[in-house]
Amino acid sequence: MFGDLEDSDPPKNNVNWKSLTNISQLDEIAALSAETPVAIFKHSTRCGVSRMVLKQFENEFRPDTKVTPYFLDLLAHRDVSNAISEKFNVMHQSPQLLLIKDGKSIYDASHGEISPTELSRNL
């Protein structure tokens, strides 16, 4: 289902994903996070575990969560994934969820630890 995405479009669902496709967006995300927390979901379109975690996250995500969600197809945009690790000082994982606030990663989780509930607790 998600493995068939074209042009790194985020999946269609109740999460209002914004596509993360360019390194220059990381400065925008850092600036935006001073006003509104930003979540970045790093997804591997070839990984069954990543697909399962993404689906579970989307099913449990509440649209009223006060966060701007970004979706990264890390296979299509490996350079952006690497830049995220450097800019926000987090070790690369896949799948991975980061919460950016005031230009810094204040929370990150990978694999089965990814949860909208935990994300909300850290807002």
Image (cartoon, rainbow, N blue to C red):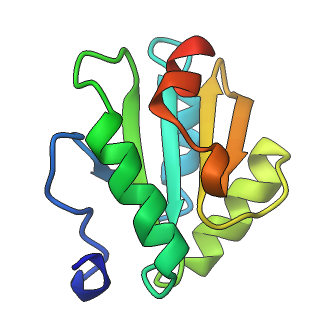
How many numbered dots are placed on residues in this image?
Answer: 0
Give percent across and percent down for residue 14: 16, 40
Q: Could you tell me which quadrant the N terminus lies in?
A: bottom left
Question: Which of the pair 103/91 is nearer the observer?
Answer: 91
Residue 9, picture quadrant: bottom left
For the point 32% across and 32% down, the residue is 61
Give percent across and percent down for residue 60: 33, 35
Q: Could you tell me which quadrant the C terminus lies in?
A: top right
Residue 3 lies, with reference to residue 103, above or below; the image says below
18 to the left or right of 93: left
Question: Which of the pair 60/3 is nearer the observer?
Answer: 60
Residue 6 lies, with reference to residue 113, above or below; the image says below
Residue 119, picture quadrant: top right
For the point 41% across and 57% down, the residue is 54
Residue 101, picture quadrant: top right
82 to the left or right of 78: right
Give percent across and percent down for residue 29: 51, 37
Give percent across and percent down for residue 24: 53, 56
Q: Is residue 45 visible?
A: yes
Question: Which of the pair 73/30 is nearer the observer?
Answer: 73
3 to the left or right of 11: right
For the point 28% across and 24% down, the residue is 62
For the point 23% across and 87% down, the residue is 4
Q: Is residue 123 visible?
A: no
